[in-house]
Amino acid sequence: MKPAAFAYAKARSLDDAIALLGAHKGEAKLLAGGQSLIATLNMRLSSPSLLVDINGVGLDGISVSNGMVEIGAMTRHVALERSSDIAKHAPLVALAMPHIAHPAIRNRGTLGGSLAYADPAAELPACLVALDGEIDIAGPKGKRSVKAGDFFKGLFETALGPHDVLSAIRFAAADANTRVGFAELARRHGDYAMVGLAAVAKANGKALSDVRLCYFGVGATPVRARKAEAALAAGSVDDAVSALDLDPADDIQATGAVKKHLAGVLLRRVAKQLTETA
């Protein structure tokens, strides 16, 4: 199938992109890496009147300053995968990157595109929630920041308005006490995960504190397992698995019961990662 006809405009700046979106009253779409958008166009799940290309507006780059990591929305997956700054200061993101699709897609796909598309089985939204990150959004009324936990509203739904542009993300850089873990289960490497888990904690002697467990593939958005977090911080992996507060629905991949079982399997694996150096 081929996409419905659409017009194309290459934005000259962030303000120009916002103006173009506003001029088309919700009928325009942003073109970043295009790895999700082109597929939805070809299947006619999306039929915008205009594509606004933001590849030239300068929203890429990785910086570390004052204990914070900031990443531009147009930063390609491959840049994150190869970045020494990400490996050192954002190890959870570094762990997740090889699981995202395949090299050809990582060469073009962008961080902002992944977050804006908000696929509930995608890795990076869950990582950002686990990291308690913030998302910068630019729109007709100026700029604002939204906590990652408030950004994902529902299935493929976010806090972005029809005339908004996701411009950057920000989260605390890892320190000597930071512990991270990541695991997912997929039918084939590069497929969307049936179940996945991104985790962050602080080493507290030989124990863990400030545990954040964020699952993907088990709900309409990334899902925090808060009761399991508390149990793991108390020191019991078995109690954490028993306390898993997830209610995944059946889908074409697996039943909800199977998904919950797999979530427990991943929790044991990730808990081992978190405590190996704690």
Image: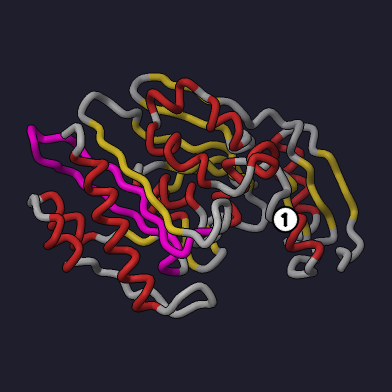
Residue 223 on image: x %, y %: 36, 61
Residue 153 on image: x %, y %: 47, 63
Q: Residue at x 63, y 49 (%)?
A: 164
Determine whether, in the image, residue 127 is placed left or right of residue 252: left
Q: Quadrant of residue 133?
A: top left
Determine whether, in the image, residue 53 is placed left or right of residue 83: right
Q: Residue at x 48, y 50 (%)?
A: 123
Residue 252 on image: x %, y %: 54, 77
Asked if 257 appears above or below 15 in the picture, the reply is below
Q: Quadrant of residue 137?
A: top right
User: Is 199 contained in the magenta span?
Assistant: yes
Asked if 70 appears above or below 159 in the picture, the reply is above
Residue 62 on image: x %, y %: 53, 25
The scheme the figure's colours follow is secondary structure
What amino acid is labelled 1 in the image?
Leu
Determine whether, in the image, residue 8 is placed left or right of residue 132: right
> Would you call the spot at circle 1 few (<14 residues within 10 Å), some (14-19), or many (20 or more)?
some
Q: Residue at x 67, y 44 (%)?
A: 105
Indicate the quadrant containing the N terminus: top left, top right, bottom left or bottom right.
Answer: bottom right
Q: What is the residue that sits farthest to the front in this orientation?
A: 188
User: Is 68 contained in the magenta span?
Assistant: no
Q: Which residue is mark 1?
A: 37
Determine whether, in the image, residue 20 is placed left or right of residue 219: right
Q: Nearer the viewer, residue 25 or 257?
A: 257
Magenta stretch, main secondary structure, is strand
Read off the magenta span: 192-219
Indicate the quadrant containing the C terminus: top left, top right, bottom left or bottom right.
Answer: top left
Q: Residue at x 74, y 63 (%)?
A: 40
Asked if 107 appears above or below 123 in the picture, the reply is above
The kind of secondary structure element at disc 1 is: helix
